[in-house]
Image: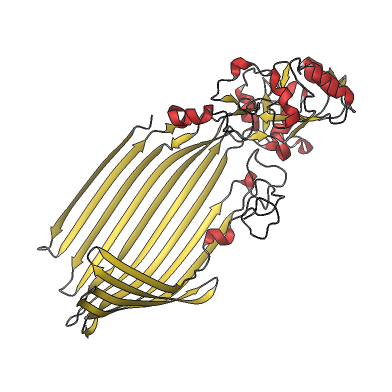
């Protein structure tokens, strides 16, 4: 795996008796994915019983138990684990292989639940038994290097109008395509599917009993709860949906034009340019499901087998879509899932981001005068910069509007339409102090100052002073004292913060944290 090739070429020519030059460069590259599973050091890591697996959630399906404190439930559960050395946990996740329940032993009480897991499925790669007696799993499809396809084009030209001024122009274009893979979206926690009990339940004239499609041991456990008729939560991955994958296409161009030259009679050079660039990113995420459509299918009898529903029921289905699910989404049977079921719940995410940048700048540098130790030189310049950013979120994932539905396993985000600008001027000075004396090959002072006026934060002045002592060609000492600050960028100002978990123990890096693990 990981095969890669690059083809590139460059050519150029002079014209107008050597006063002009033009260069063109092109390249293309293609790289195949490199998989962790093909690397022996990753396989060794996965097999290490002292290292936990990297799957967030097991690949098996089960239920979120609610049998805590129920002696009948506890006794029934224990009876299903003949090799258990103690009580099997009646809370947390209980998984099923066919009719056989088991746990991954995430808690001390749950370790007895590991005893039911078939040993022939413990390969110490995808599924591993730790030195503590718990089970965990490793995601087998992770990349070491992403697949990549890229095209580049570059053009640059310059022409000397006279001996002191030249016109310059350049352009750049890039197109790239990448793909990433992520673990499937889980049915867990707030992304749960709460399944109703079907006990002689009449649905549209048909009587249903969930004992007809659920594992018999699961039915017995549900019936042993304090309220046998209560709904229950399924946990696991969506049958047949597979990994989440993100396919990204990025288009980038940049154009620059301007003048450069020298000032007649003095040792100064200058340049003045304007550039315009844009980068557009289109991302398609597959393997994602609509949470509400998933719930509608999986909570139907037989986990949606034979499901059929017309949208806009209140309006008689006017202008609406319809969906069917032939096979159902049974998380326990292991049966193949029909294409119409996947189509009924799929919600691929389409997102577009566009960054535009406009820059105008002018710079000049040269000698001010001769000092005993060398030339005193200066540089001055001014810059105008504007950045505009637009991010269009997929409707189902839009934080500020999609309140009836969301994507399974993915947090909402916010569309952005914002712009920032900045005007800056700077000056720098280089002053040689001592030159070619014993122990001092060169001692110089460099100083600089910059004033920036940001559209967001207003004016700001930064500066630096640097001493540079060159003892010999192979030894140099440098000391710098400076004041630095910057305005926040667009991402820092407008990106929506997402929290994956809740930390109840405070900041582990804070010296003010009273807990034992704090800094």
For image coordinates 74% across by 37% down, the residue present is: 312
Question: Between residues 306 and 220, which one lies in front from this camera angle?
Answer: 220
For image coordinates 70% across by 53% down, the residue present is: 515
Residue 244: image location, x then y, percent: 56, 35
> Compared with residue 461, is residue 334 higher up or lower down, i.e. above or below?
above
Q: Quadrant of the N terminus?
A: top left
Choose top left, top right, bottom left or bottom right for residue 64.
top right
Side of 149 relative to 134 (left or right):
left
In the current view of this chain or complex, which residue is farthest to the front? 438
For image coordinates 39% across by 44% down, the residue present is: 176
Residue 105: image location, x then y, percent: 70, 28
> Compared with residue 91, is residue 27 higher up or lower down, i.e. above or below?
below
Question: Between residues 135 and 298, which one lies in front from this camera angle?
Answer: 135
Q: Quadrant of the C terminus?
A: bottom right
For image coordinates 84% across by 19% down, the residue present is: 76
Choose top left, top right, bottom left or bottom right for residue 74.
top right
Residue 253: image location, x then y, percent: 37, 54
Side of 85 relative to 35 (left or right):
right
Residue 37: image location, x then y, percent: 47, 28
Question: Between residues 192 and 307, which one lies in front from this camera angle?
Answer: 192
Side of 163 relative to 293 (left or right):
left
Can I make out residue 93 in this image? no
Side of 499 relative to 299 (left or right):
left
> Compared with residue 158, is residue 454 higher up or lower down, i.e. above or below?
below
How many marks can you see?
A: 0
């Amino acid at each position: 795996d990981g095969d890669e090739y690059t083809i590139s070429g460059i050519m150029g020519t002079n014209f107008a008796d050597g006063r002009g030059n033009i260069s063109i460069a092109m390249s293309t590259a293609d790289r195949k994915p490199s998989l962790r599973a093909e690397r022996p050091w990753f396989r060794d890591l996965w097999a290490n019983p002292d290292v936990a697996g990297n799957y967030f959630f097991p690949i098996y399906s089960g239920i979120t138990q609610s049998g805590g404190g129920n002696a009948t439930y506890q006794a029934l559960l224990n009876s299903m684990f003949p090799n258990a050395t103690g009580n099997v946990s009646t809370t947390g996740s209980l998984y099923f292989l066919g009719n056989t329940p088991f746990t991954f032993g995430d808690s001390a009480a749950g370790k007895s639940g590991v005893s039911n897991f078939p040993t022939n499925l413990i390969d110490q790669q995808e599924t591993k038994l730790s030195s503590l007696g718990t089970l965990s799993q490793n995601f087998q499809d992770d990349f070491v290097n992403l697949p990549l396809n890229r095209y580049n084009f570059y053009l640059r030209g310059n022409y000397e109008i006279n001996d002191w001024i030249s016109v310059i122009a350049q352009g750049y274009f890039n197109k790239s395509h990448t793909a990433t893979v992520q673990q499937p979206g889980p049915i867990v926690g707030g992304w749960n599917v709460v399944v109703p009990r079907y006990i002689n339940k009449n649905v549209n004239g048909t009587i249903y009993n969930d004992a007809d499609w659920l594992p018999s041991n699961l039915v017995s456990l549900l019936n042993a709860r304090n309220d046998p008729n209560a709904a229950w939560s399924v946990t696991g991955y969506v049958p047949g949906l597979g990994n989440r994958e993100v396919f990204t296409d990025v288009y980038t161009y940049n154009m620059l034009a301007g003048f450069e030259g020298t000032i007649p009679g003095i040792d100064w050079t200058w340049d003045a340019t304007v550039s315009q660039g844009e980068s557009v990113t289109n991302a398609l995420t597959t393997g994602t499901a609509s949470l509400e459509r998933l719930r509608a299918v999986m909570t139907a009898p037989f986990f949606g087998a034979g499901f059929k529903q017309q949208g806009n029921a209140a309006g008689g289905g006017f202008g609406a879509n319809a969906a069917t699910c032939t096979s159902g989404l049974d998380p326990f049977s292991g049966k193949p899932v029909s294409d119409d079921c996947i189509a009924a719940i799929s919600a691929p995410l389409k997102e577009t981001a566009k960054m535009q940048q406009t820059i105008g700048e002018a710079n000049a540098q040269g000698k001010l005068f001769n000092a005993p130790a060398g030339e005193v030189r200066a540089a001055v310049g001014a810059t105008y910069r504007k950045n505009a950013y637009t991010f269009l979120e997929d409707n189902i994932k839009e934080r500020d509007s999609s309140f009836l539905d969301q994507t399974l396993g993915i947090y909402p985000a916010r569309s952005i339409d914002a712009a920032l600008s900045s005007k800056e001027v700077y000056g720098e000075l280089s002053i040689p102090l001592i030159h070619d004396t014993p122990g001092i090959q060169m001692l110089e002072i460099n100083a600089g100052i910059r004033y920036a006026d940001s559209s967001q934060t207003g004016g700001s002045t930064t500066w630096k002073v640097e001493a540079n002592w060159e003892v010999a060609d192979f030894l140099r000492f440098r000391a710098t004292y400076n004041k630095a600050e910057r305005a926040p960028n667009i991402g820092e100002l407008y990106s929506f913060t997402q929290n994956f978990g809740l930390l109840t123990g405070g900041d582990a890096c804070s010296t003010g944290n009273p807990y034992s693990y704090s800094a």
